[in-house]
Amino acid sequence: MTLPPNDLGEYLRRQIPLAAAMDVSVEAADAAGVRLRAPLPPNVNHHGTVFGGSISALALLTAWTALHLRLDAEAIPSELVIQRNSVEYLRPVADVLEAFCAAPPAPDWERFVSTLRRRGRARLVVRAELLSAGELVATFQGSFVATRSEGESLVAGG
């Protein structure tokens, strides 16, 4: 599924106010994955670099968005929450921060969806990479849990 970045950006800012506070923008959201971006000024720490919490939050938001869009594209209304995560900070970031979460491998996704449909609850581990000025600055791994529900769709008219 491809959703116009402006529509997705508005959705994230409305549903997750931290995305607005961080000035998060959507660079890409398609079948390959999701790429979000955050500028330095609203995410700066006392060292003049990106605050570690902003790095973690952008990574988590990117991974959550990638899974949320996939669930929505498959017409599976669900609540998606983070269960646990870890971030490895590789170097300070003094510029724009980007996070990319690739679509999960097909076998993992199929198992996740099958379990969610059968049991009403499923868990999936995803990874994201954080980049600045073309360099890898952090990595993220998160375990997300989805439960079936009736929720707001991101698909226009859905």
Image: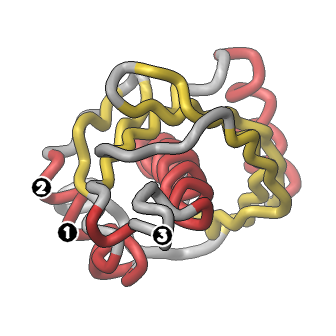
- Residue 75 seen anywhere in this rendered image of the structure: no
Mark 2 or mark 3, whichever is nearer to me? 3
Compared with residue 142, is residue 90 higher up or lower down, i.e. above or below? above
Check disc 2 and report its element: helix, strand or loop: helix
Q: Report the residue marked by disc 1.
A: 10
Residue 3 coordinates in the image, percent (x, y): 22, 44
The local secondary structure at tag 3 comes to loop
Q: Amino acid at mark 3?
A: Asn
Disc with the residue nearer the chain's start (3 vs 1): 1
Q: Determine whether label 1 and label 2 are within 8 Å by CB.
A: yes
Res 79 label:
none
For mark 1, give the secondary structure.
helix
In the rendered view, tell whether residue 67 sits above or below residue 102: below
Check disc 3 and report the residue beneath it: 45
Left or right of 145, for residue 21:
left
Residue 108 relative to residue 10: left or right? right
Residue at horizontal 61 percent and vertical 57 percent from the top: 56
Assign the C terminus to one quadrant of the image: bottom left
The CA distance from mark 3 to mark 1 is 26 Å
Labels 2 and 3 touching (C-beta < 8 A): no
The type of residue carrying mark 1 is Glu
Percent x, y for residue 145? 78, 58
Q: Position of residue 8 (x, y in %)?
A: 24, 57
Crowding at dot 2, Cα within 10 Å, few <14 / some 14-19 / many 20+, comes out as few
Residue that numbered label 2 is attached to:
6
CA gap between label 2 and label 3 equals 28 Å
Is 121 on the left-hand or right-hand side of 44? right
Question: x and y percent of residue 24 in the render?
Answer: 29, 60
Seen at 49% across and 72% down, the residue is 46
Q: Are there few (<14), some (14-19), or many (20+) residues within 10 Å of tag 3?
A: some
Identify the amino acid type marked 2: Asn
Tell me what residue is drawn at x 49 percent, y 41 percent.
Answer: 70
